[in-house]
Amino acid sequence: MTKVILVTGASSGIGLALCERLLSHDPEGLQLCLACRDVQRARDARAALLASHPTAHVTLVQMDTSSVSSVIGAAQEVKRRYNRLDFLYLNAGIMPNPHFDVKAFFRGLFSSRIVTMFATGGGGILTQEDRVTADGLQEIFMTNLFGHFLLIRELEPILCHAGLTSQLIWTSSSNAHPSAFSVDDIQHRRGTQPYSSSKYACDLLSLALNTHYNKQGLYSSVTCPGFVMTSLTYGILPFFPPFLWTLLMPLFWLIRILTNTFTLTPYNGAEALLWLFKQQPESLDPQAKYQSSTSGLGKNYTQPRKMDVDLHMSEVLILSVKCCSL
Ligand SMILES: NC(=O)C1=CN([C@@H]2O[C@H](COP(=O)(O)OP(=O)(O)OC[C@H]3O[C@@H](n4cnc5c(N)ncnc54)[C@H](OP(=O)(O)O)[C@@H]3O)[C@@H](O)[C@H]2O)C=CC1
Ligand SMILES: CC(C)CCC[C@@H](C)[C@H]1CC[C@H]2C3=CC[C@H]4[C@H](C)C(=O)CC[C@]4(C)[C@H]3CC[C@]12C
């Protein structure tokens, strides 16, 4: 039976690489819908996918996850086109206005945090300046988490079907950290790490969604693509021209020997997202984060890692998120 798959943020990076890999895995049996905010970039992505898979079914829907009305409009369009959705990849994400703390970076280099700092971007080396959207919500929270929550809520009728299963697959991050998140400030209005907070909220929300929806056949899983060279990463050091990143590649390959989270290419980063596509959702651990990993010799594999999440907090978050959507 044909599987219907919707991917948010499919116009570039990990989302586009995932689409390519899904089509290579099953060129005829999929109906792929690319949900993108920029129509021209979406068209370019579709053309690139069709160039390598000319007989594939690939459609587009315009959706900006940072806008309530855009998400609701796009969901209506998706429901009009399909009466069932098998996979929903919640991948669109931003880290705008990042600040790279050079001092914290060099302090980390000479401390025991050196490996975790590289693997997670943690240790205070990255902060961001957030904005408020036209809907009055924090942009990073809205784009990475809340827009996706609204999408799931709106698509519920085509995600939950008696006797069939569907999967939600989040692109989270190893940068998701409980210390950046507070249930009293779920949008992270007051702190300096809204990206980390939004990704930790994705981890919590996935857990809560499993509690609420498993009995209706809907399962949610969390992935981490590792550290991947994409436009999101290039934006972290905007003064760094692309050729300098290329010069750093040998250093990154060396670091990969110490931490297999340096997946580096979007193709490698999409590994866990594709792996989940091939699993029976009932067999997955709702408290695991499925990590794309690449060995020093370049072999790709998926590793489950226990998330630092608790059920009570996940329930508090889903209630607060529901309140935001009233
Ligand atoms: N790169 C990395 O090392 C890591 C990335 N991630 C996560 O992976 C995901 C994909 O990022 P990555 O591929 O790296 O970066 P890219 O910037 O290449 O891709 C991000 C995608 O999200 C889309 N997007 C951004 N904002 C919106 C919006 N408001 N509405 C709809 N789509 C939007 C972008 O669209 P457009 O083309 O229009 O900009 C783009 O297609 C993100 O969630 C990111 O947080 C997690 C861990 C590590
Ligand atoms: C020699 C220096 C100039 C090299 C600086 C490298 C840093 C800019 C990057 C090293 C580790 C990177 C990251 C790690 C984790 C990512 C995380 C999982 C994510 O979700 C978004 C991107 C990362 C934070 C990424 C960002 C760049 C690094 C800090």
Image: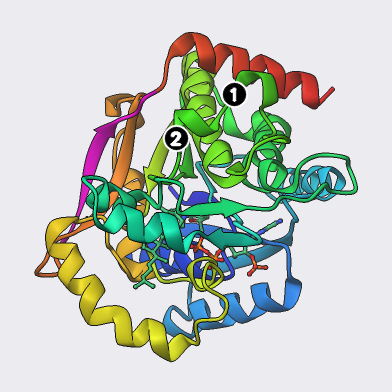
Residue at figure coordinates x 31%, y 81% from the top left: 248
Residue at figure coordinates x 58%, y 43% from the top left: 193
Q: Nearer the viewer, residue 141 or 285?
A: 141
Q: Nearer the viewer, residue 237 or 260?
A: 237
Residue at figure coordinates x 64%, y 37% from the top left: 191
* Above or below, 139 relative to 237: above
Three-letter amino acid code of the residue under disc 1: Ser
Residue at figure coordinates x 69%, y 39% from the top left: 151
The residue under label 1 is 182
In the picture provided, is 293 more to the left or to the right than 17?
left
Query: Is 304 a magenta residue?
Result: yes
Measured as percent of width and height from the top left, residue 49 is found at 49, 77
* Above or below, 309 relative to 275: above
Three-letter amino acid code of the residue under disc 2: His
In the picture provided, is 75 more to the left or to the right than 245?
right
Please give the label number shown on residue 129.
Answer: none
Measured as percent of width and height from the top left, residue 18 is found at 42, 62
Q: How is the image coloured?
A: rainbow
Disc 2, ligand 2: is the CB inside 8 Å?
Answer: no
Q: Report the residue that reaches farthest toward the bottom.
A: 243
- Whole-angstrom CA distance, mark 2 to mark 1, is 11 Å
Q: In the image, ligand 2 is in what quadrant?
A: bottom left
Please give the label number shown on residue 177.
Answer: 2
Give, as a single range, the part of the protein colored magenta: 300-308
Dot 1, how many residues are within 10 Å of its Cα: few (below 14), some (14-19), or many (20+)? some
* Above or below, 72 relative to 97: above
Measured as percent of width and height from the top left, residue 321 is found at 70, 24
Dot 2: element: loop
